[in-house]
Amino acid sequence: MSDMNDMNDSMSSEQADNNQNNHLNVTDADTAAETSTPAATAPVDRTWLTKAKDTIAQWAYIMLKDADDHDIDWDWVRSLDLEHGIGVAQPVDLEPGAASNVHDLLKADLTIRDRLEAIIAKMSMVFMRDFDRHIKTYELPRALAYADRRLTDQIDLLRDRGVAEGLWTVTDEDRERVTVPVLHAVEGGLLTDDDLADVQDRTAEIVNARAEQRKADREKREAAKHERQMALFAADEKHYGSVEAGPDESAPADSSSDANSADDLIEGPQVINDDNPAVPSIEQVRTNETAVPEMRYEKSRHAAAEHVAARQAAAPKDYWREVYLPGRDVDNVMGIDLETNGTEPYRAYIIDVGFEYMNMKSPRPTALPDDYRYDKDYYESGDAYDQHRFSFGVTPEAARHGNAFIIQLTGIDISQRTGAEFPLFDEDPAAQADLLHRLTSQPFVAHMATFEHSFFMLNVAGYAEAYRNGHVTIIDTLPMSRLWDEGSIPCEGHPDGDNTLDAYAKRQGALHEDDAERHLGLEDTHIMLLAMKHHLTQLKAEARGPWGPSGKAGVGGKRIVNYRRRSWRR
């Protein structure tokens, strides 16, 4: 416990030195320290949450069903009070001993959340596939996520109230892809486990069902693709002849593709023997181009189909993160890492943001300071520059609930992250605007970048629109580790190799072997960029990675490319 307190004290003093404001400022982009102070008394403008519902008609025009294939009642969405809260409980209901029925309140709030999150989960895909741009902005998903975070806070406090009143206990349990809080009836209490069935968190059930459905849909698409290939294969056979049928069986000698070939000149032209019933006559050839008995034709067709299927099955599967790999011309990048109090961007808050810049090819700008102090004593700036760290807060409800796991992981105690000193990121438009400017000015790099991307989509105003319009380029060091790092060896617990940032940074010499990833935004960003630059230098020397046969020219990374339809004038 004393070690944890020492770590927290060290972190607090570091933040006091390096994070005097918590407010991103574009005009200070060339400095390594932040100096402006947010106005503590400035009221938070939440009117945008209500205005966001003005775009419901745009969404309703395209998006008829949610992620669970249920019809969406957009009038219900329109009825939600996004500014003041969408849960049924009042502040007094969150207190232990309140007269209200905590079981019924929790059940109602969970029902609202499940219904709302099924809509949010579908909106990103719909927005990105809206090629005709019926949907103009991504404000509505951000607004719904804003309300969902506050609803989640309320649900947590209702669970806490039930614990305080001796109705149940709560344990976090792994359920395949996610970890969920599970309620257990207290022995001899008022409620039984059966009574708690309708207030259990259904997140794991929902997420796992969606994953299985995606898997089934993927298999269905692959089967349909295979069927189309086989149909084309059969059509070609009927038109050009069986694969196994040679020129002596499928066509007269003078029309054979082997005519005048080297073998033909040596062996002489093929002779059609009218006395041999196994050899087709000229009339048969003219009436039936294949001139192969049906049974034999079917046998050869199926043999060829099986060969094609076997070859496709043996081919290496595409790794979907390959699109995030850097190209051989990548240079100036901004590395970024987020710390949050959860994994779902529509439930969790951004509590720590760290980013810095590094050039992968060109020299570091000499005019910028090079003595930045990181949380780790042996970390040195090296080629990094323009370092920034920012701390953000959570709602009073989230602070009251706390998060022991985040304290253990990062040293950040969210119970202390309230007040003017720690603004909420999703209520800080200036911070969002500055971060958007930085994210669109050059490629940004993250480890498992889909995590940062998902939080940007539902927290940064304008990011989703910029991403859809091709103004954001994302590079991920996770596929670099998995595909290009020879030290990433499959092992127990890591079937694709250990590709955590901790393991990757150690293999690339960016982190001491006896040390561990700090789990703070700026520190993790620093070791990631150091590892990336060292790795790229090694790959170039060995003509691998971006410089190998499958490497890409240019900056690389994932960026949406918009192809405009051509209009032809006659």
Image: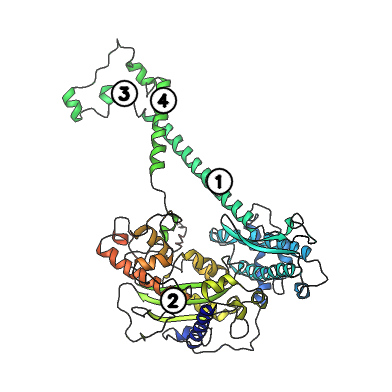
Q: Which mark is residue 299?
A: 4
Which mark sits nearer the N-terminus, 2 or 1? 1
What residue is drawn where x is 32% and y is 55%?
A: 550
Task: From the top left corner, tell me how far across and down residue 210 is, in percent.
Answer: 59, 52
Q: Which mark is residue 251?
A: 3
Task: From the top left corner, tell me how far across and down residue 4 is, in percent.
Answer: 53, 78
Q: In terms of image quadrants, where is residue 164?
A: bottom right
Which residue reaches farthest top? 275
As helix, strand or loop, the secondary structure at mark 1 comes to helix
Disc 2 vs disc 3: Cβ atoms closer than 8 Å? no
Q: Say which amino acid is labelled 4.
A: Lys
Query: On the image, numbered disc 1 is attached to which residue?
Result: 216
As helix, strand or loop, the secondary structure at mark 2 comes to helix
Q: Rounded to the nearest whole Å, what is the CA distance between mark 4 and mark 1?
A: 31 Å
Q: Rounded to the nearest whole Å, what is the CA distance between mark 3 and mark 4?
A: 19 Å
Q: Few, some or many C-alpha atoms within 10 Å of disc 2 (few <14, some 14-19, many ≥20)? A: many
Which circle, 2 or 3, is nearer the viewer?
2
Which circle, 4 or 1, is nearer the viewer?
1
Q: Few, some or many C-alpha atoms within 10 Å of disc 4 (few <14, some 14-19, many ≥20)? A: some
As helix, strand or loop, the secondary structure at mark 4 comes to helix
Is residue 238 visible to us here?
no
Compared with 318, 302 (above or below) is above
Q: Say which amino acid is labelled 2.
A: Glu
